[in-house]
Amino acid sequence: MMHTLTVRDKLDAFIRWFSVVAEATYAAATGFFRGPQGQIPDEEIQTAATAVSTAKIEECTQLTENRYMFKSYDQLYMHYCQKNDLKPHFVSNIRGLKGFWIGSPSAKYIAINFHGGGFAMDATAPYLDFWPRIQKSLANSGIETAWFHCTYTLTPHAGYPTQFQEAVEALRYILEDVGRSPSHILLAGDSAGANLCLAILSHLTHPSEDVPELIIKEPIKGVILMSPWVSFHHSWPSVEASEHRDIDAREVMTEWSRAYLNGWPSNNYIEAAEASEWWWDSIQVQQTLVLAGGDEALLDPIKAWVNRFKVPNPDTTLVIGERECHVAPLVWPMFGDYHETQQERALKHWLLERLG
């Protein structure tokens, strides 16, 4: 059943949003006086305000309020098309697939993108700045790509395995309906979207009973994982160490993971960090890029997962952006910080090297 907000709910949401400004101002003003776990140099005061602001947004935003306070990804895409004089190209089918295209499906390479947001929040405006910018940088080097952005169902309207199923259907659509070869397909995702990329990889080698089987005849070209949400546990040292430096609030992450689990016990398709090394043997991907922020809560589980994954998959690159938070290339622009992150530079370099 669709959840709606009353006038009281909307007023409460607005008041909570107003408090974000005060939190951000306080973060900037007190940045110099924090202890070793949160010391912030002068040039990073804005970043500190960003981190506290985003965490506050997460903390004060209930699942149903997300629909009221943010435009949907489809709405953002319509605005993007209008701004760039493009004809919208939406896709949906009876198997549950939903998404839209930027670029021609006949391009040499197809990237399937899954946005983050804890399975609860839709993509934000910076997604349609960042990923098209990556696409344009490749085009400037003579590499033609098209990007299919999957707009999977959000919680609380559905939980696991719905998002997993829809992600697999996105790949099936590109393979069977568009008729593209796995060797010309990339999977890309940030946070929860990267979680879905890993679920797809697991499913291709170890078919899940919860999702229709998908068989491919050769490995896909590559996978790009930005701050992959590989563990729902908060016992990792980086969670405590990043408390004043990252955007993620534990209470919100707990709520979001519980909503996604939807009463199901966790498994390797849900938390990749729980899978043993042997699980990743014979995974159907040629090469993998993992991006993470040096100040993010998920850093330890990401590193632990990479250490297992790369043993049977040596063409795996991990890049850690120093003093960068969780999905910094997509978060910082929300607060007016548009400088190129280390993660973005690494992504461009990796793509040019692997696709050129």
Image: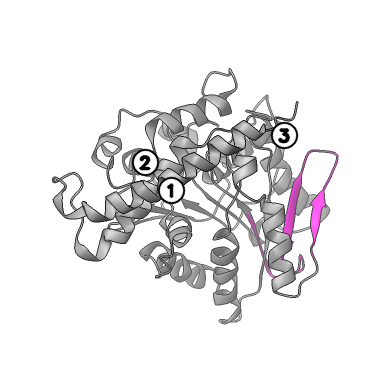
Name the one closer to the observer, 265 or 151: 151
Q: CA distance from mark 3 to mark 2?
A: 30 Å
Mark 1 highlights which residue? Answer: 227
Q: Which disc number belongs to residue 298?
A: 2
* The stretch drawn in magenta includes residue 13: no
Name the one closer to the observer, 253 or 228: 253
Instruction: Please tell me whether mark 3 or mark 1 is closer to you in this view.
Output: 1
* The stretch drawn in magenta includes residue 99: yes
Mark 3 highlights which residue? Answer: 213
Residue type at numbered disc 1: Ser
Disc 3 on helix, strand or loop?
A: loop
Disc 1 on helix, strand or loop?
A: loop
Residue 100, percent from left and from top: 74, 56
The answer, for residue 275, to whether it is visible in the render is no
Residue 302, percent from left and from top: 38, 42
> CB of mark 1 within 8 Å of CB of mark 2?
yes
As drawn, 48 above or below 69: below
Q: For the magenta stretch, what is the residue range?
A: 88-112
Residue type at numbered disc 3: Glu
Compared across the picture, whether 272 is left or right of 9 comes to left
**Residue shown at the point (51%, 67%) measured from the top left:** 351
Residue 241, percent from left and from top: 24, 40
Name the one closer to the observer, 229 or 282: 229
Residue type at numbered disc 2: Leu
Classify 10 Å Cα crowding around label 1: few (below 14), some (14-19), many (20 and above).
many
Which mark sits nearer the N-terminus, 3 or 2? 3
**Residue shown at the point (44%, 60%) measured from the top left:** 329
